[in-house]
Amino acid sequence: MRQALEEDFRRPEFRGENPDDYEIRSDGKCVRKDRWEMGIQRVRELVGIEPTQEWEISDVVNAVERIIKH
């Protein structure tokens, strides 16, 4: 992957965004660097772990496994 550049941000959906928060995947798509963290935070929310609780990724995985088994 490469660092996103100012020229990658000329499209309307990226106006006002900070290029330092983005990178370009090998397929050419501009993506947020923190997309994996944002994804696990969303899954954490969906499985009912409160953001104020102390949690680890394994807690999220275990909660998903419990849901799948039921």
Image: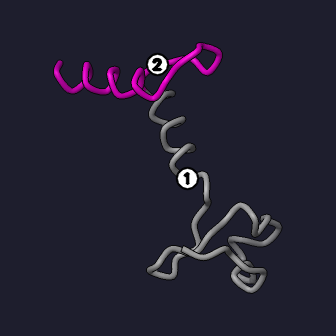
**What amino acid type is highlighted by mark number 1?**
Arg
Q: Secondary structure at mark 2?
A: loop
Label 2 CA crowd tier, 10 Å (few <14, some 14–19, many 20+)? few
Q: Is residue 1 magenta?
A: no
Residue hosting label 1 = 35
- Which label was assigned to residue 23? none
Which comes before the other along the chain, label 2 or label 1?
Answer: 1
Residue 30 lies left or right of residue 67; in this view the side is right
**What amino acid type is highlighted by mark number 2?**
Gly
Label 1 CA crowd tier, 10 Å (few <14, some 14–19, many 20+)? few
How far across and how far down the image is residue 49, in percent?
50, 18
Residue hosting label 2 = 48
Residue 64: which quarter of the image?
top left
Q: Secondary structure at mark 1?
A: helix
Q: Which one is closest to the eye, mark 2 or mark 1?
A: 1
- Mark 2 → mark 1, Cα distance in angstroms: 20 Å
Question: In the rendered image, which quarter contains the C terminus?
Answer: top left
How far across and how far down the image is residue 19, in percent?
75, 69
